[in-house]
Image (tube, rainbow, N blue to C red):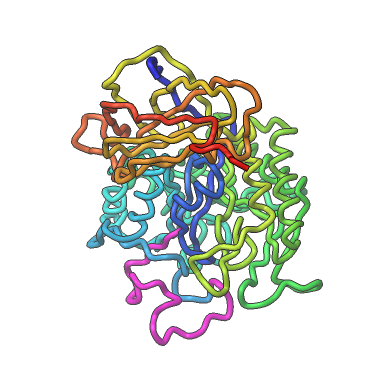
Amino acid sequence: MENIFSVKLGRAQCAADLGDGSERGEYVPQDYILQKLGRPHRAVSLMYCYYPLDKEFPARISEVPDMPKARFQWDYPYDDYFPYLGGLNGSTDGEPFASMRDIRRHGQDVILTLTIDPFVSDDHLAAIGDDLRPFGRLFLRINHEATGNWFEFNKRATYQQVADFYCRAVHIIKEHAPNVLTILCIGGVEDLSSEEMVREKEFAQAVRETDIWSVDKYISLHWGHPFDIAETGGNSHQRTSVRDIFEMIKRSYERFLCLNGGVPKPMLVSELNSDGNVVGAFGQAEDIRRFYDMIDSENADWLSGVTFYQFRDRGRLGLEIQDVNRCDTGVEQPVLGVYREIINRPRFMPTMAAGGEVSLPVKLRWGSSEDAEGIAIPLHFDAQPCFCELYFEDDSNLMIELNGRWFYKSPEASFIDLMPAFYKRRISTPADMELRIFAPPATGENDLSQPDGMFNYYYTLEKLPTIRIRTSPAEPCRD
């Protein structure tokens, strides 16, 4: 390890994002997800609600004592997401900020999906912006699926009022937090016989003022869960062909583009899945494989990213199902292995650009999961290793990549076992490869005292870890 080089982390052709927690499942810590999937995502999506004018808030509405039993998922006074505990007179000590810090420590950006009462004052929106300032590049999806009729904000306001609120929220929040990128999520094209999107007249100004366009699309969905069971002939579920879903997303982008005078913006699918309650576990895996295959085969370079909804679910919309006996335990579904293969395809992988030789101490920069500067250490392996380990003498917070596998080192960790990088990608001949190291913020927050602290985090690496590589066991077999 005599020489070290700079390396630049860049964006994928199509970003892989992941939902983690919603009305249907609890947040799963990033250490576990990284261990299961082997690589970080560009961003992780969290879902929260903010209805501070309601007497029940900030309680989660389904947990309010004496609350009447719901007849369906959205049959509450406000949306049954986890409550956003920041905002006006709030605090950033709790959620979603603890989860946001966990996500950013692990080298990922946050997508914060936030349903908001459209009648909150400007002061509430300004306070949300102030909350989000330390979290670097952050994607904010305000009042998603805004052309639907199930969320409480759509029940309290007209579609035009919801659209106008979106524009007001964008202006105020971004004034206080320029690091925030806003995502407009509306229904898009829902009928291929129509040339227009649903409610596009009302949302035309929002289309122009947002940073990013998006739609949510489900190849199949049982929206009646958990209040009924999807059976043939029922009216609480649907299934659409993968081809039609793909065409709806593409046509939605084309309409967004038209409404914006032909000027492109990033296009996301902010929620994508096929419901195992409808198609079964193997059907879900096949639908997801076919959708991502289509992105590749169609060379859909107009699509900037896809968020798989979600990691763990109480129903069958997750890579794991929540164990009925232990809420903190997941049961892996067939789609998890399919998804793990997908996110390691070249189109969905971030780029790594090699730079020149550098020397210690070296200043590492973390701008985002698509813009970071780290180091690369050349390593040589005479054969398949039996041991490959790192030993640290500092309190660095690092994301480490070797042989396509990513590892997280917390400030408390002094030892990282890199052998999982060789369990599924064994080497049969001598090989050279690079150990790559990046330094996302140790606390999950940027240092706003720095001149560009809202956008960049810096860490000076003083010393390299000691690496131990052995190609044979400590003691040979004596049989």
Q: Which residues are magenta?
A: 47-74
Q: Residue at x 42, y 46 (%)?
A: 110
State the image coordinates of residue 142 (x, y, percent, origin top left): 44, 52
Residue farthest to the left, as pictured:
449
Magenta segment, principal secondary structure? Answer: loop
39 inside magenta stretch: no
Confirm whether residue 260 shows in the render.
Answer: no
> Is residue 71 in the magenta section?
yes
Q: Position of residue 159 (x, y in %)?
A: 52, 58
Residue that appears at 62% across and 34% down? 425
Against 59, residue 200 (above or below) is above
| Image-quadrant location for residue 365 | top left
Residue at the front extreme? 479
Q: Residue at x 40, y 19 (%)?
A: 1
Front residue (pair 360, 392)? 392
Which sits in the foreground, 39 or 418?
418
* Residue 424 seen in this snapshot: yes
Percent x, y of residue 2? 38, 16
Residue situated in front as seen by the camera: 463 or 351: 463
Would you identify the image quadrant in which residue 56 lies? Answer: bottom left
Q: Residue furthest top?
A: 356
Residue 221, image x and y in percent?
Answer: 68, 62
For this rendering, which residue is in front, 160 or 475?
A: 475
Total labels drawn: 0
Q: Residue at coordinates 48% horizontally, 66% vertically from top-left?
A: 328
**Quick one: quadrant of the C terminus?**
top right
Specify the quadrant of the image occupied by residue 234.
Answer: bottom right
